[in-house]
Amino acid sequence: PINRTFAIHQKNLIASGDDEGVVKLWDVRSGSSCVASFENAQSDFISGFACNDDGSTLLSSSGDCTLCAFDLRAATTQNTGDHSDGMGQSNSLFRRSDDQEDEL
């Protein structure tokens, strides 16, 4: 189930995060259209979102002690689907930090 949402007003988007670490972007103008889905963004629940001032970058935090940065300029022009290589390695749409649990 979805446990976190975040409005990105500059882009007319809503980001949602679920218990499995999936991040989705929704276009509020269409009512129900998912414009991007990041199936392997993080490996645990999404705990929070933040966005920069111009709405070009979305950050998500997770229960797996990682932070992901999403390039919204590229993400909203791509088809939905799995935008990672399954290993958590970076690609053109997002990058994931190392586990920060030991750093806290």
Image: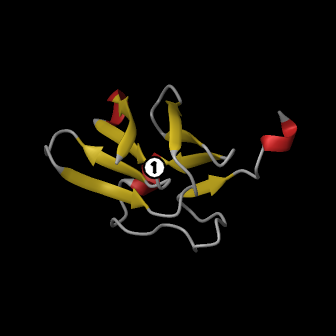
Instruction: Say which residue appears at 35% left-offset and 57% top-offset.
Output: 36
Instruction: Say which residue appears at 50% left-offset and 34% top-offset.
Output: 49
Residue 88 appears in view = yes
42 with respect to 10 (left or right): right
What residue type is disc 1 on? Asp
10 Å neighbourhood of mark 1: few (<14), some, or many (≥20)? some
Tell me residue 28's x, y (percent): 21, 39
10 with respect to 95 (left or right): left
Residue 103 lies in quadrant: top right
**Secondary structure at numbered mark 1:** loop
Instruction: Say which residue appears at 58% left-offset and 74% top-offset.
Output: 85
47 with respect to 66 (left or right): left
Residue 58 appears in view = no
Residue that numbered label 1 is attached to: 19
Instruction: Say which residue appears at 56% left-offset and 52% top-offset.
Output: 44
Q: Given the current orientation, which residue lies at the most extreme left position?
A: 31
Q: How many marks?
A: 1
Instruction: From the viewer's side, name the closer residue of 80 and 3.
Output: 3
Tell me residue 63's x, y (percent): 61, 44
